[in-house]
Image (tube, rainbow, N blue to C red):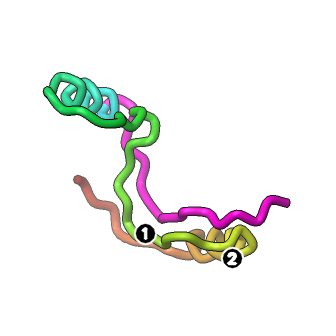
Amino acid sequence: MHDAPLRLFFGLACPPGQAREIAAWRDSLPIHGRSIPPADLHLTLAFLGQQPQALLPQLLRIGDTLHAPAFEV
């Protein structure tokens, strides 16, 4: 097993249609840099930083216990 740390976060995926619209808007702007693929767009709720791979199962279990009321962005 590869032991390199993982860069982890808890987040919400951007709906595909909305991600395409955001990417199209972004691509129409005169900006430079590396574009994030639409499928990778998300809203980060909690950034966990670099974590050892061995901690991933525990973090997933913690994530499974988190609940919050629905909201719109």
Q: Are marks 2 and 1 in contact (CB under 8 Å)?
A: no
Q: CA distance from mark 2 to mark 1?
A: 16 Å
Assess disc 2: are there few (<14), some (14-19) or many (≥20) residues with their C-alpha within 10 Å of its C-alpha: few
Vertical comparison of 53 with 35: above or below: below
Label ID, residue 72? none
Assess disc 1: are there few (<14), some (14-19) or many (≥20) residues with their C-alpha within 10 Å of its C-alpha: few
In percent of width and height, residue 31 lies at: 18, 32
**In the image, what residue occupies the spot 33% across and 62% down?**
70
In percent of width and height, residue 50 lies at: 55, 70
- The quarter of the picture where residue 20 lies is top left
Vertical comparison of 64 with 31: above or below: below
- The quarter of the picture where residue 44 lies is bottom left
Residue 44 in the figure: left or right of residue 29: right
Residue bounds of the magenta highlight:
1-17
**Pick the front one: 52 or 55:** 52
Secondary structure at numbered mark 2: helix
The amino acid type, in three-letter code, at marker 1 is Phe
**In the image, what residue occupies the spot 54% across and 64% down?**
8
Magenta segment includes 21: no
The amino acid type, in three-letter code, at marker 2 is Gln
In percent of width and height, residue 19 lies at: 33, 34
**In the image, what residue occupies the spot 71% across and 68% down?**
53
In percent of width and height, residue 34 lies at: 36, 36
Vertical comparison of 51 with 9: above or below: below
Write down the residue under mark 2.
58
Write down the residue under mark 1.
47
